[in-house]
Amino acid sequence: MDEQNIWEGSPSQWINFGFYLLCVPLTLVFGLGVLLALWKYFDTRLHKLEVTDQRIMEHRGIFSKTTDELELYRVKDLRHDQPFLLRILGLSNIVLETTDRSNPVLELKGLKEGQYIKEQLRVAVDKRRDIKGVKEVDFK
């Protein structure tokens, strides 16, 4: 079965706004702030997210690359967050609670059209769980 791409992109640099503000005094005092800001910029720029109808792939790294995959049938809960600054800028975060051992909580930060992506994810998760025959049972 071929995977269909739902969305791909990178987080917005606005998620680093506070970090960049902290780099200003470090630049004035030590000159180190420029290097730290550049590192953070490239770390965010090279952080790629790929959402398909079967999984979410997260590619990270500047010199060394790491790819983490989350199968959609493992997603238990989706949450759409819009902190004040991101809401003003039209950005949002999507938080996924999963049964994945290596990544039980996955945050997709600083996304444009976050509500749309969340809805696409919700539909894809439901379809994938039906295909895999996965049922969730809660014990109390």
Image (cartoon, rainbow, N blue to C red):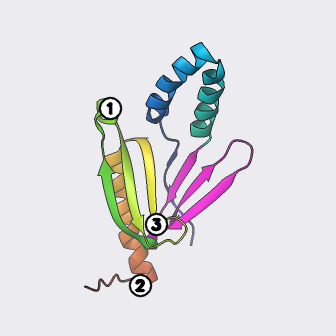
Mark 3 or mark 2, earlier in chain: 3
Magenta run includes residue 26:
no
Can you tell which mark lies on residue 104?
A: 3
Residue 113, image x, y percentages: 36, 42
Residue at the extreme right: 63
Stretch of the chain drawn in magenta: 47-73
Label 3 SS: loop
**Taking 115 as reference, is 109 left or right?**
right
Residue 61, image x, y percentages: 66, 46
Q: Quadrant of the N terminus?
A: bottom right
User: According to the image, label 1 marks what residue?
Assistant: 85
**Mark 2 Cα-neighbour bin, 10 Å: few <14, some 14–19, many ≥20:** few
Q: Which secondary structure dominates the residues rendered in magenta? A: strand
Magenta run includes residue 55:
yes
- Residue at position x 56%, y 58% in the image: 57
- Residue at position x 63%, y 21% in the image: 34
Between disc 1 and disc 2, the foreground one is 1
Residue 33, image x, y percentages: 60, 23
Residue type at mark 2 is Gly
Q: Quadrant of the C terminus?
A: bottom left
How far apart, in angstroms, are the residues tagged by discs 1 and 2? 40 Å
User: According to the image, label 2 marks what residue?
Assistant: 133
Mark 1 or mark 2, earlier in chain: 1
The quadrant where residue 130 appears: bottom left
